[in-house]
Amino acid sequence: MARVMVEQVFTEPLSDERYAAFAKKLDPCVEVRDIAWRRSSLSTDRQRMVCEFEAPDAESVREAFRTSGVPFERAWTAQVYAVEDYPERKRQLEALLAKTKRS
Amino acid sequence: MGAPSAAIPAASRGLGIRILGELTVSRDGATLVLPPSKKTRALLGYLVATSVPQSRQRLCDLLWDGPDDPRAALRWSLTKLRPLLDERGVARLVADRERVGFEPLGAHVDLSDAVVHAGRDVASADLDALRRASDTLCGDFLEGLDLPDCYRFHEWCTGQRERVRALRLSVLDALVDRLVDASPEEALNHARERLTVDPLSDVAHAAVVKLLARLGRKAEAHAQVEACRRILERELGGRRSPALEIARAEIGRGSAPPPATTATPAPGPARRPAVSPSAPASLTIVGRALERSALEDFVSTVRSGGNRNVLLLSGEPGIGKSRLLEEVASLARADGANVLHGRAFEAEAVRPFGLWVDLLREAVAAEVDQELRRHLAPLFPELGESHRDAESRARLFGGIDRLLRDAAARAPVLLVIDDLHWLDEASSGLLHYVARVTPGARVGFACAARAGELDDNPSALRFVRALRRDGRLLDLVLAPLDEAEVGALLRAAGTGDVDSRSVFREGGGNPLLSLEMGRALAAGEENAPRAIEDLVHERLARLDPRARDLVLWAAALGREFDPESLAAIAGETLAGTVAAFGDLEHHGLVTSAATRYAFTHELIRKAVYRQLSGPRRRLVHLTIARALAAGSDDVGIAWGDVVHHASLAEDATLVATACVAAGDRALRMLARRPARDFAARGLAQTARLGLAGLERRVDLLRIAALSMAMNPERQAALEENAEDAVRVARDNGRPDLAARALFALGFLRNERGDFEGAHEYTRHAPVGARAIPPAEAVPALANAGFCLAIIERELPRARALLDEATETARVHGFSIVDIELCDGFLAHLDGNVLRARVALDRGLALSRAQGDGWREGMALIRQTMMAIESGSWAAAHAHAAELRDVAKRVGGEGSEGAIADAFDALALRGEGAPEGAAKVDAAIRALELADAKVMLAYVLTAAAEQEIRRGELADAKLRAEAALAAAEPMGKPSAIVLARVALGRCAAGGGDVDAVHAHLARARELLEHPYGVSKRARDAVSELAALSNVSSNAVVHARSAILDRR
């Protein structure tokens, strides 16, 4: 399985309704291609979004988006570097979050 | 501060709430100011009238149905209501996390008082109590609180109005019965009042006739008989009335007629010479120096393509927003700009993109190129055929952006939008889009809105907030005029020497109210009323009867209207109508522009409208709805308006019929939410119609299913409704309707991703019985089939879905791209080359016609694969070139370019071109980078096969191993089989019989895979099996044979 990132750009802010409509259209196409959604990050102006999927390949994800008519800019397979794999960085992050929470 | 309690009559002490008539709340006799938000006032009315705790969800569904945060809107409204209802130590508004309710706790609610007076049994109620009940019941329930876009509230309100009306009728009947002998004069008053409540009741007419006869007023009695006959003739087709005949017979038995003078109705107010005020629209602007300077700056910002190109004028009704909009329009025009006007209408909140149709109709009529015509056609059917697919809405938005930019390249463009607070959601979305993409393009937006009511329109509010946040909005909040300005305004209006100080004091500096009061004073009204309502009432009384009647029709028709339609609806001649409107213009009630008239202000229209009694309103709206629905062609009929008028006329059948037409049109205009709303509104009506409404119900279910804008709860309710419709249709011998309901059900299941359920239902809908299956439902079936064909899974089900879609499309003459592509893909997998070619050619043509780059690419990829498989290298090059062209056009960064390069390289290699090998290597690297594993496996396998034929077995083996590694994670059995067979062949070429058998065995296992395997893969396995059957020596011979085939 690969980690596939999908970038989307919207000409008008993405409403919750439109997001739900995308998800509804995409879900069956994603499911039949053995793709699983991991998470999405939406910009605060709601005009850009990056979604992460676990998928057999990036093309399956492109196909799912196109079959369901959901627009995207590009889809690419990524190598993931996460803080969980770097104990020192993880400690720094936890310290920072704890500090922010206290203040 | 309230008045001292000793000075207040007992009945007025404490909190008083009036829900009959206009909603008012008073404390110790003083009227409190209600929140400007209509929905907040509607919530108050609802909570008070129901007086039992309601769930928050129900309240949200009632008034804030939408994608925004309904619960937050409800919380906000409750914070506005709490100070009105609660007092120190008395919490009437009781709310917890789940429920909200109103507890009277000593508050007087007029409806409750009336119910108490009337008692449980009206017939046995005390006479004085009945009189008090009659007095209380004279107002319409929540008068003026109509919310056309909240159909659930509207339904409830209509039901309550009917209930109050029935109670009032029974009270009046009881009063007439009790008083007929004791006091026939008073009984006659009540009988006449009953007639105003129910003018179509012949029994009510007969009661009046009898009482007149009893009082000896024979001439009036005969006149009443004639009036009743005329009404029955006009409204009920001349039905005979036994009750009226009996009453007529009694006229002769009455006492002698009194002198004729008493039979003459009391004269109305003497007609005074009218002052000749100009219409407010043409008045010079008084005061507003700062605002005018800001408008000049705004116009120059638009001209220079500046960033702050959206103007919002806000303030209370009548404060002068529209007048300043006119001012900015004329400033812009003088500056050389092209000004486009549009207005949102309260009644048209359900007309998707209505504002834009009005704004752009003229601009679109000018020459636009073919591509733009196609993009704009969903809004302007006269531009020709529009294509509907997932990108249509984006193309429409882009088309309007281009239209405006093209116009702005010639001269600045100003879009003037009045009453933004009533803007429909679809128009808001488009406005938001256009405003965001046009900075720098010399396009400006000048809008006006009532600040309080803007809060009720989440989509318009979102637009305003977003632009304000981005610093794009020029906000001008209009304050009341000062005393000197009011004086100047009255002088400019030619009201003569009226006391402007008193007008200022009473009118609070509101220009509209000041003008109305000034006119009334100038016309000789010594005690000019203080409310617009009363002022307008006075003005109407001075009108010619024909003009008075026509203006009532016009008020029901809307803010703007054309005299021809009005004349036709009101049964007047055009000449008479135009003449009457001269009178109305003279009185400043309406203004004219081009061929249309408009009320000078929405408040004036509403005040006129309220002069219509409830039953008359229903008749007027029914006549309007019928006249509008009887238009000559579907395109010309404003179905949203028909829904509006038919709802006010309480004609469930017409509402449902119009909702079907309006919903279908909304779908054509790509406005799915309005389509869903029309469907829901119509379905609420069909619930009342029973079997008579079944066909409309099925149509509305289809529209709801196709609108695809539902939350899961709604979806479940719709599925239940559709299942029930199927049962009802079957039980009543309507298999055609059952089939159509099944189709809607299938579509709903399909949308939910329940393909099995979808297929089950669509399979049960016999094709021959589907009278009018929706053009939109067939693509959904075809798409599901195509999806399975692409991923090569569940191929038998893909074929079943294809057959279903094909048959329905054939019956109804649809051409659906996914049907052709699905057919082409499946035929290719089946090895039916000819059929695949024909279907793919058709699919390609349809994709191109619809501008669907992705599908065009899919067809071309498959065609190129077929050309490579048959060794048609020239065809492969040609298709690859087309594919490369598509790659540039398809939205989003795809792999089409890399695939085209790979196909080209394979064709070169097939032709034996020297650069072929390097190109294949490069193409494979590009596909690896794009991470397109299925296509990578295909190209690697094809390259391996070419190398096997060349005898380059070591290279071929490496390619085939890479192909297998790419194919296996994708779970496509055909691709895995072909890679295995290539490896088997390499092994055979090298004489490794064990390896051949191993690959053959693994390939054979896959032939039984439930997803299904292509014919090409099956043939390849057979070929490898033939190779494996020969001895080691034969393998060597076979190797020679393979090499010979180079």
Image (cartoon, helix red, strand yellow):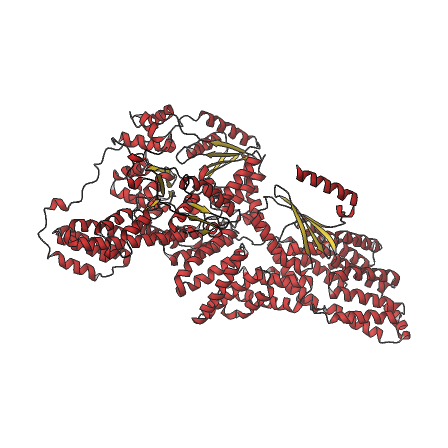
Residue B105 drawn at (x, y percent) = 37, 45
Residue for point 28% across, 42% down = B547
In the displayed structure, does residue B238 sit left or right of residue B559?
A: left
Residue for point 53% across, 29% down = B300
Q: Nearer the viewer, residue B49 or B969?
A: B49
Which quarter shows the N terminus of chain B? top left
Task: Determine the image quadrant of residue B528.
Answer: top left
In the displayed structure, does residue B220 sit left or right of residue B324?
A: left
In the displayed structure, does residue B125 sit left or right of residue A74?
A: left
Outermost residue toward the left in this view: B256
Residue A103 drawn at (x, y percent) = 66, 36
Outermost residue toward the front in this view: B89
Up-down relation of residue B860 to residue B1006 (above or below): above
Up-down relation of residue B649 to residue B26 (above or below): below
Q: How many marks?
A: 0
Residue B802 drawn at (x, y percent) = 61, 66
Which quarter shows the C terminus of chain B? bottom right
Residue for point 65% across, 69% down = B796
Residue B483 can be seen in this image:
yes
Residue B615 can be seen in this image:
no
Residue B175 drawn at (x, y percent) = 21, 53
Q: Nearer the viewer, residue B266 or B299?
A: B266
Q: Nearer the viewer, residue A60 or B887?
A: A60
Task: Determine the image quadrant of residue B748.
Answer: bottom right
